[in-house]
Image: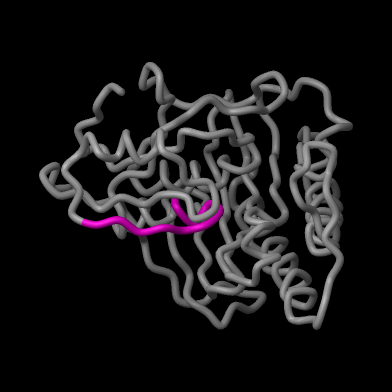
Amino acid sequence: MDFERLTTEMRRLALQAGEKIMEIYGSDDFEVRAKSDTSPVTAADEAADALIAAGLRAAFPDVALVTEEQAETHGQSANTFLIVDPLDGTKEFVQRRGDFTVNIAYVENGLPVRGVVYAPAKGRLFYTTADGRSVEETGPFGPEPGEIASIGVNATPDNRGLMVVASKSHRDAATDNYIGCYGVRDMTSAGSSLKFCLVATGEADLYPRLGRTMEWDTAAGDAVLRGAGGEVVRFDDHTPLAYGKPGFENPFFIAYAPGVLLLKD
């Protein structure tokens, strides 16, 4: 893989998709439909998916591509593939809360090694560079990258008082009970893959997810967090979260800064 080109294309397509999404987000009304799994989908999901898929297929025709909105057309994915969630956080989008993202990632040998997470309503853009480091670019965003700052996890989290981030729309008692096993200084909530990015920047130390997610929900944020020195592991045995699973469904997982002393449930 040409990682220089991959970084350029992922960034470009994420920004273009974000522009499409914000056009619909700013309209007076938009239709919300239910997919076969009862999750919501809008014209913004579909427009962003079409734009990103076309761009990636043109740029990388020999690489397998998985996208959320075309998932039913995919069989078991390859070990190495591109994976896209064109609008992660559709519930936040529908409720006009702003915590939604465009996610594009590249998985190699079962691990997400490059990714971009763009939150157009928040004006935050995170991605991995060609050499695998994670950065945040500050807007306004144009064809060429603007001001870029390297990001990294909190290197010395205080296990007596961690900063924890949890889901805004999918919080449950099991998650709260698990968080309660730690010393917690404060908690914040965020939608979509922004939770990974808050750990990646050191704004949070720990993000546990005890609920259903799909690989396209997590791959880009996972890549950004890994590139910032963080880790994402299965909840049950603390082994790295792997990609390319049958059906693309994830087990429960924990994203964290390595200084956090993980506890078994």
Q: Is residue 156 left or right of residue 69?
A: left
> Is residue 215 magenta-colored?
no
Q: Where in the figure is residue 104, as x and y percent of width and height?
A: 65, 49
- Residue farthest along the front direction in this orientation: 173
Q: Where in the figure is residue 26, as x and y percent of width and height?
A: 74, 81
Q: Where in the figure is residue 64, as x and y percent of width and height?
A: 78, 33
The residue located at (50%, 52%) in the rendering is 128
From this view, report whether residue 252 is shown above or below residue 227.
above
Q: Is residue 72 left or right of residue 68?
A: right
In the image, the segment drawn in magenta is: 186-196
> Is residue 188 magenta-colored?
yes
Q: Nearer the viewer, residue 50 or 4?
A: 50
The residue located at (56%, 83%) in the rendering is 140
Q: Where in the figure is residue 66, as x and y percent of width and height?
A: 76, 37
The residue located at (35%, 59%) in the rendering is 188
Q: Is residue 120 left or right of residue 20?
A: left
From this view, report whether residue 139 is shown above or below residue 247.
below
In the picture, the quarter occupied by the C terminus is top left
In the picture, the quarter occupied by the N terminus is top right
From this view, report whether residue 72 is shown above or below residue 126.
above
The residue located at (56%, 41%) in the rendering is 218
Q: Nearer the viewer, residue 257 or 80?
A: 257
